[in-house]
Image (cartoon, grey):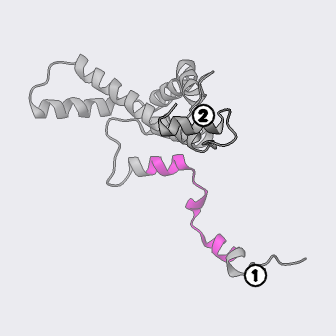
């Protein structure tokens, strides 16, 4: 077995230290969903009026289906839904009343129902068709920039259909 130039076959970077690997905490087997749930349900940071399970579904779509629009789409959908829920309630004028209404929304969030709804929204055929339509090039349309034309060779005299006398007459202004 020959070593490739510039690569030391005995390099420390290429070896896996099994002791270090075994010493990793048990958390190493966690999924992204586990980390998001832990982050937003415990500690200082708590999810406000958005669903944690709904965000997990959007992250899963982003990771597993390369759906780069999933998070933004679901955040907008959930915020819009929460605003609609607040608007359907009694008119709120005092800051305290608004805070209580938001707290009530938080308490009424059913994570399992939200996750199912998010999955349905992310897999909605109209949404998926729009994504495909936006990513695919339009038929019969293509981009032609001015820089392409600048790269073409331009013949300036000599070898053209005009005779020397005709070219000279045109530049001297005489006929």
Q: Which residues are magenta?
A: 16-38
Q: Is residue 17 visible?
A: no
Q: Residue at x 58, y 40 (%)?
A: 148
On screen, 109 above or below 31? Answer: above
Q: Nearer the viewer, residue 30 or 70?
A: 70
Q: Residues within 10 Å of mark 2 (few under 14, many from 20)?
A: few
Q: Main secondary structure of the magenta part?
A: helix
Q: Residue at x 56, y 32 (%)?
A: 143
Q: Nearer the viewer, residue 136 or 104?
A: 136
Q: Secondary structure at mark 2?
A: helix
User: Residue 158 location in percent, x, y?
Assistant: 66, 43
On screen, 171 above or below 109? Answer: below
Give the residue number, with chain letter if any, for mark 2: 166
- Please name which of the two marks, 1 or 2, marks the residue nearer to the observer: 2
Query: To which quarter of the image does residue 5 belong?
Result: bottom right
Give the residue number, with chain letter if any, for mark 1: 8
Q: In the shown orientation, is residue 12 left or right of residue 123?
A: right
Q: Of callouts 1 and 2, which one flags the residue occurring earlier in the amino acid sequence?
A: 1
User: Residue 55 location in percent, x, y?
Assistant: 46, 38
Query: To which quarter of the image does residue 49 belong?
Result: top left
173 drawn magenta: no
């Amino acid at each position: 077995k020959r070593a490739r130039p510039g690569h030391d076959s005995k390099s420390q970077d290429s070896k896996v230290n099994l002791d270090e690997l075994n010493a990793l905490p048990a958390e190493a087997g966690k999924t992204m969903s586990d980390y998001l749930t832990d982050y937003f349900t415990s500690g200082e940071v708590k999810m406000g009026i958005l669903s944690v399970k709904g965000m997990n579904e959007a992250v899963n779509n982003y990771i597993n289906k390369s759906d780069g629009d999933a998070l933004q789409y679901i955040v907008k959908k959930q915020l819009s839904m929460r605003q609609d829920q607040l608007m359907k309630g009694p008119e709120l004028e005092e800051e305290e009343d608004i805070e209580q209404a938001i707290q009530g929304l938080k308490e009424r969030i059913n994570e399992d129902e939200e996750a199912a709804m998010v999955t349905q929204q992310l897999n909605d055929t109209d949404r998926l068709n729009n994504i495909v339509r936006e990513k695919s090039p339009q038929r019969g349309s293509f981009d032609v920039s001015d820089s392409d034309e600048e790269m073409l060779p331009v013949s300036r005299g000599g070898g053209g259909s005009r005779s020397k006398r005709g070219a000279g007459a045109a530049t001297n202004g005489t006929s």
